[in-house]
Amino acid sequence: MAIAEMNPEFWNHRFQHEHYMFSRQPNAFLVDFEGRTTVKGRAFAVGDGEGRNGVWLAEQGWDVTSLDYSADGVAKTEKLAKERGVTVETVCADASTWDYPAEAFDLIVLLYFHLPRDAAMRAHAGCVKALKPGGYLLLEGFRKEQVGLLSGGPGVAEWMYSAEEINEDFGALNSLINRPVGRILREGRLHGSAAVYQFIGQKPA
């Protein structure tokens, strides 16, 4: 399945239906973080899918850019934003090759954003470049121990996170949260026990 996931048409097929595959509700780790910070500004949701996280951030007062390489996902993001009465700038692009602006965002979120290792490294480097000094990067995704579990994920360990890879890619950030966790997923079709990695880093001022 992971090879198919490299093709935008794989996600276009999944996102073309009226229902929202991962629900319209935001990620719980993101909600917890946002509720604990007084920062507002520009937010960048990478691999935002159908927009549930980017649109929610806009509802909280952030100026949001939402990127995904599925045109159908981007269209559903725009539809959800309109329904919620907020404005979200959408970008349909490959996160591993997109031209990231320098020091543009106060918050960057990578939520269940999985790519082959080389592509992930390029996307992660772009995110570090695009983060403003003092800005936060928040990541939650499957770690390699997710292989074999039935609660979601690309099914290939190379696409998932390890502590070593997180520290390699985001070592330039000050680590605030950096941990493997087990959690119960209740996000759309994903449901059940999952092996997850959580990271929050702040770019030095």
Image (spheres, grey):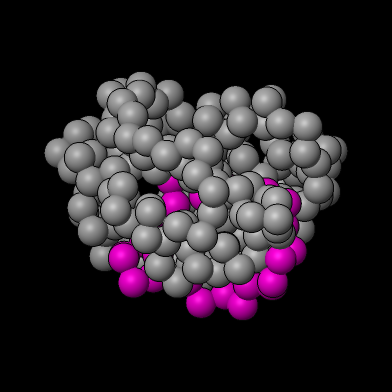
Q: State which region is magenta.
A: 96-120
Q: Residue at x 36, y 22 (%)?
A: 184
The answer to whether residue 171 is visible is yes
The answer to whether residue 93 is visible is no
Across and down, in percent, residue 78 comes to 72, 51
Question: Is residue 7 positioned above or below 90 on the image?
Answer: below
Residue 182 sits in which quadrant? top left
Question: Is residue 7 positioned above or below 82 on the image?
Answer: below
Question: Is residue 92 positioned above or below 157 on the image?
Answer: below
Query: In the figure, is residue 21 to the left or right of 79?
Result: left
Residue 110 in magenta? yes
Front residue of 133/60: it is 133
Query: In the figure, is residue 171 to the left or right of 164?
Result: right
Front residue of 200/7: it is 200
Count of marks, rendered view: 0
Front residue of 190/32: it is 32
Q: Which residue is drawn at 81% across and 48% down?
A: 41
Classify the position of the N terminus by image quarter.
bottom left
Across and down, in percent, residue 99 comes to 61, 77
Q: Which residue is drawn at 42% across and 39% down?
A: 178
Front residue of 128/70: it is 128
Across and down, in percent, residue 3 comes to 26, 65
The outermost residue toward the left is 148
Across and down, in percent, residue 10 comes to 39, 60
Query: In the figure, is residue 167 to the left or right of 12?
Result: left
Classify the position of the C terminus by image quarter.
bottom right
Q: Which residue is drawn at 28% across and 33% down?
A: 195
